Amino acid sequence: MLHLLPLSTLLLVTQILASPLSHATSKPLPLLIWHGLGDNYAADGLHSVGDLAKATNPGTYVYYIRLDEDADSDRTATFLGNVSAQIDQVCHDISTHPMLSRAPGLNALGFSQGGQFLRGLVERCGDMVPMQTLVTFGSQHNGIAKYQVCNDDDWLCKGYIALLKANTWGSWVQSHLVPAQYFKETNDSTGEPAAAYLESSAFLADINNERELKNPSYAERLARLHHFVMYVFEDDQTVIPKESGWFAYTNASDGSVTGLREREIYKEDWIGLRALDEKGGLHFKTTEGGHMTLSDEVLTEVFETWFGAKSGQWSGVESEKQEIIEL
Ligand SMILES: *[C@@H]1O[C@H](CO)[C@@H](O)[C@H](O)[C@H]1NC(C)=O
Ligand SMILES: *[C@@H]1O[C@H](CO)[C@@H](O)[C@H](O)[C@H]1NC(C)=O
Ligand SMILES: *[C@@H]1O[C@H](CO)[C@@H](O)[C@H](O)[C@H]1NC(C)=O
């Protein structure tokens, strides 16, 4: 697949002097950012979001989640890989990171698929990543019912999507092609998940605790968040259905939407969302525009409301230096 070949080799080098501060100054909690499909952790756009977070809440340490230090390989990992293994790796990276592992709490911002992966991280990694507030934009918490539409001349995209469509529930596709792992098929006459999805979904059916056998730790860990803020883009045409960003179910036959609070996952509290809601920690938000239309105003509001020093503080570690080098 051509678009997955390296264009140039960029490396983000992070150097940390992990000695505790001699004098106690309070800093906001570190912020993790997980980018979406086709993006990479060293991308300018992503760093401008991180810079805005630092400008809004001075002293914030921002960590851009990556599956590979090489930016092109990190981008490839948004298309190709075993999502569960990726989450294990991120769990390990964060819990052994010289700065992040010392913080008493962490906040996180997830874009598109990065949002449900961060939620998976909270559920799977638990105490090793003491997440306090999670904000997701245009994520696919209840999966996608359709794969993305490629541009007319984008044959590589078309080939990739054709491969996804041909064998979504096959074990090779479920362990190698990322979007298949959050694809969800529902029988629209009953509203029930399709048997093939429950049987074969390698990621979503598990983290949503949709199978007979539930993992109670998932619910405990998610309910422990202070806040979970879910943004849906009003005119999102990429995520189908866009209401997935709020864990809602959309009937593909008539377009009717069943909100989270009307669904079993909430009523029986399979993953802790009801407990979180009852303590005032679950937030449903809308923002203008299509998929990933992010304005500085909306981001600044998010940073001020959820990631400021009032939502948690720590003394930090001495210094940190990041630079992007071109090889
Ligand atoms: C995907 O990764 C998980 C976690 O490392 C592992 O348990 C699972 O066996 C992997 N799946 C496949 C098909 O390799
Ligand atoms: C959906 O459920 C109905 C009622 O159980 C069943 O008759 C139908 O075959 C199902 N459709 C599919 C595509 O599985
Ligand atoms: C979905 O919409 C169709 C068409 O209106 C309807 O027959 C069906 O009962 C709906 N399914 C659910 C689960 O509400």
Image: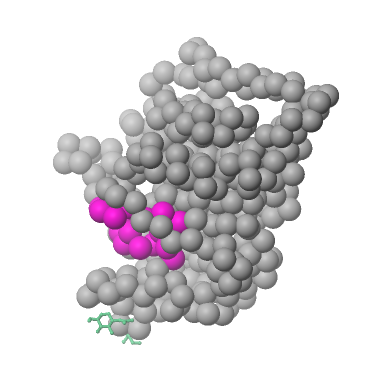
Does the image show residue 182? no
Colouring method of the image: one colour
Residue 73 point in image, percent of width and height = 48, 30
In this view of the protein, which residue sits in the foreground, 14 or 143? 14
Q: Which residues are magenta?
A: 230-247
For ligand 2, the image quadrant comes to: bottom left
In this view of the protein, which residue sits in the foreground, 292 or 76? 292
Q: How many marks?
A: 0
Residue at 41% across, 57% down: 285
Residue at 43% across, 41% down: 299
In this view of the protein, which residue sits in the foreground, 170 or 73? 73
Residue 20 point in image, percent of width and height = 81, 28
On whether residue 241 falls in the magenta region, the answer is yes
177 vs 26: above or below? below
Place residue 250 in its image quadrant: bottom left
On whether residue 156 falls in the magenta region, the answer is no
Does the image show residue 265? yes
